[in-house]
Structures are given as structure tokens and as C-alpha cells.
Amino acid sequence: MMKPEVNFGWDPGQYTKFLSERTRPAIELLSRLPAELSVKEAVDLGCGPGNSSAVVYSRFPAAKITGIDSSPAMIQEAGQKYPYLHFAVASIDQYESPEPVDLIFSNAALHWVSEHEKLLPRLMNSLRKGGTLAVQMPNNHMEITHTTMREIATDFTWSKDLSAIRSTPPVLEPEQYYDMLIPLSASVDIWQTKYFHVMNDAGAIGQWLCGTGLRPFLDALPEGEAARFLELYVKRIAQHLKPRKDGKILMPFPRLFIVAIKN
């Protein structure tokens, strides 16, 4: 079994180990934008290492595309890889466009930000009339990959209290998003896709989630305890997700998608 490395904070190298799988939902989200949509200026919120910004560029190569992320390391990586795009360090929860834009795109970022009841309407207000808000968020709070994190946090004694970390579902119900967006929208399209990513083993799942879901737990602990947490996590995942006929493991990963057109 591959032993995952312990990395702390938003690490571009860790995140990009599964970049094609992380980019796939961005491509699906982009494919559902209106065919007639004209974009002169777009913002990619939580752009990470720039992979999702490049996806937007592939559809709107004439547009000014700005990727925004709170991690300086991610922005540095994005700027080096995609020098023809614009990138800036900024916080999503404080983002407001100085001028209305045509597209606000966010792939796997808004679930790290709280108070969606305020956030999404504010993002809609940053769009021009007819502009589009396109959002994808992992919706795996109750999947075994994430319930196991919370079990490890409370089943063992750690030097820090981990019980409150990721304890509240970060993504609301689809009906809640519809109700908050429809008063501001000409149309709201919401759907969910459940991916089953083919992973080599439980260690690979730990490696994937070290870059995202496990990060808050590992960051809270001293290095030795973080390594122990990760070891316990991988062992439990191996008990829950059994190898298929080829020895690989399927990691369930539901994602919620929203496309709202401003009225």
C-alpha cells in the first residue's frame, strides 16, 4: 500500500497529484454554461494552481480571466504555469467585484467558505445582467471518506480538540440554494454528479485527501500526531472500501453543481 506523505497547509504539489480528477468537474461545469453566453471578463474564485482558470480560458480565450485564491503558494504556481492569465491573492469571503463581470466560476472552493446565504447573493450582485454564476462544490460530508475523518478525530486522544473540525456540513441542500438564488436569477440549474474515482489503494485515498479534506485535521496537530492520524485514517478506509476485481478501490465523491443566470 502506498504510504501517503504528510503535508501541511495548501500545498500545490500535494493538490496537483490528482489534478486531472480535480479538473474533470470544472470541465463538466463549463459544459453546462449557456451556449450563447458571451464573456469579456471572468473571475475564477478559489482557482488553486490555475487548472480551473485554464478550463475557463479554453471556452473564452478572448476574455480577461482572473483567478483568485487565498493561498500565495497556489497563486505563484498558477502564475508560473499560466502566464497568459491574471491571478491575485484574495479571500473569497471578502470578494466583491469593483465592476460587474460576465462570469463568476468556482470549482471546488466555496465549501471552504461559510455563510452561503450571504456569499452567493453577494456574488450574484457582482454579475452584470445576464451574467452567470457557475459553482461546483464537493458534497461528500456524509460519505465514508469524510465520516471516517471525524471518527478518527473523536475516537482517539489527541493533544488538540478536533471535535469541531468539519463537524457542520459545509454545503447546503439544493433546495436552499435554489430559494436563495431564484429571486436574483432568470434561471437556476442545479444537479449532482457522484463520481467513483479509481484509486490504487487506501493509501492513495489518504494521499488525495491530504491536499483537501484531511488538511484541517492534520494542520491542527503536531507532526508526529498528524502522521498517526493519517495512518489510522488509511487503515479504516481500507476496512470500509474493499478492492475490486482488479485490486483497485473506488472512492465515492458526490459533487453539487449550480449554474445561475442573473435576471
Image (spheres, helix red, strand yellow):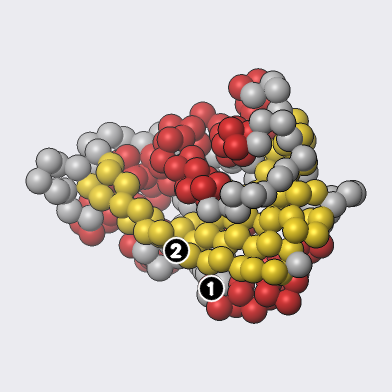
Q: Name the residue rendered at 56%, 66% in the picture.
A: 189
Counting from the top left corner in percent of width and height, residue 130 is at: 75, 58
Looking at the image, residue 239 sits to the left or right of residue 161; the answer is left
Give the percent coordinates (x, y) of residue 256.
Answer: 50, 62
The answer to whether 119 is drawn above or below residue 22 in the figure is below
Residue 43: x, y in percent? 73, 44
One can see residue 172 in this view: yes
The tag on residue 188 is none
Marker disc for residue 192: 2
Query: Of callouts 2 and 1, which one flags the residue occurring earlier in the amino acid sequence?
Result: 1
Mark 2, other Cα within 10 Å: few <14 / some 14–19 / many ≥20: some
Q: Identify the amino acid type marked 1.
A: Pro
Considering only vertical position in the picture, is 10 above or below 99?
Answer: above
Mark 2–mark 1 CB contact (< 8 Å) = yes
Q: Residue furthest left?
A: 245
Rendered image: mark on residue 174? 1
CA distance separating discs 2 and 1: 9 Å
Q: Which quarter of the picture shows residue 39?
A: top right
Q: Position of residue 105 (x, y in %)?
A: 65, 49
Residue at image x 28%, y 42%?
199
Q: Label 2 amino acid?
A: Gln
Q: Is residue 115 positioned above or below 238 on the image?
A: below
In the picture, which quadrant includes the N terminus?
top left
